[in-house]
Image: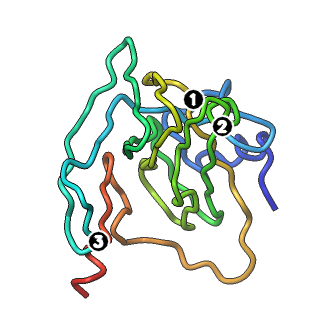
Amino acid sequence: MILSGPEIQKRLGTDIVIEPFDAKYVNPNSYNLRLDKSLKVYTEMPLDMKKDNPARDLTIPPEGIVLEPGKLYLGRTLEYTETRNLVPMLEGRSSVGRLGLFVHVTAGFGDVGFKGFWTLEMHCIHPIRVYADVPICQIFYHSVEGEIREYSKGKYQANAGIQTSRMWMDFTK
């Protein structure tokens, strides 16, 4: 079952934390999250799953920045979220998708107990100018059946910013 927009608002401060929260971003069954001004791009190709691949920081200026096809841009949500007793999911907004911008490659599934900012894996099919603070994606929440074991520690838990892939850590275990 997916929570309705009013149910998302009702659970704020208990099962759901969204900071900052603005009621104008509540949808019938989701909440719009905005794009922060920070981006990252990898600087050395090919990328290597066993390495901590270097990336450089970009800042979206007030006039926006043009994203180029064939390049992965890592961004993050402006909002910090926490989720208890629910599964958070992230999807692009249809208005963004209709411009040819994808906001996540495969990582739209969150874990019960996730705390932090959402890293966005953005790519486009043609050049597109993007702006900070624009509603870029939407978060929605599924109820959980059965015993809940919350995600409490991991490679991406309690992050403070954009996180490049930490898959290399899987090879050090």
Residue 158: image location, x then y, percent: 36, 57
Q: Quadrant of the N terminus?
A: bottom right
Q: Label 2, label 1: how many angstroms apart (C-alpha)? A: 8 Å
Mark earlier in primary sequence (1, 3):
3
Q: Which residue is mark 3?
A: 49
* Residue at image point 33% right, 24% down: 60
User: Pointer 2: residues within 10 angstroms few (<14), some, or many (20+)?
Assistant: some
Residue 85: image location, x then y, percent: 64, 66
Please state which of the two labelled residues, at mark 1 or mark 3, is closer to the viewer: 3
Q: Label 1, label 3: how many angstroms apart (C-alpha)? A: 31 Å
User: Pointer 1: residues within 10 angstroms few (<14), some, or many (20+)?
Assistant: many
Is 13 positioned to the left or the right of 48 in the image? Answer: right
Q: Indicate whether 21 appears above or below 91.
A: above
Q: Identity of the amino acid at label 2?
A: Arg
Q: Which residue is mark 2?
A: 93
Q: Indicate whether 167 appears above or below 13.
A: below
Q: Label 2, label 3: how many angstroms apart (C-alpha)? A: 29 Å
Q: Is residue 147 visible?
A: yes
What secondary structure is marked by label 3?
Answer: loop
Residue 29: image location, x then y, percent: 78, 44
Q: Identity of the amino acid at label 3?
A: Met
Q: Is residue 14 visible?
A: no
Q: Are marks 2 and 1 in contact (CB under 8 Å)?
A: yes
Is 148 positioned to the left or the right of 143 in the image? Answer: left
What secondary structure is marked by label 2?
Answer: loop
* Residue at image point 20% right, 48% down: 43
Q: Which residue is mark 1?
A: 135
Mark earlier in primary sequence (2, 3):
3
What secondary structure is marked by label 1?
Answer: strand
Q: Identity of the amino acid at label 1?
A: Pro
Q: Quadrant of the C terminus?
A: bottom left
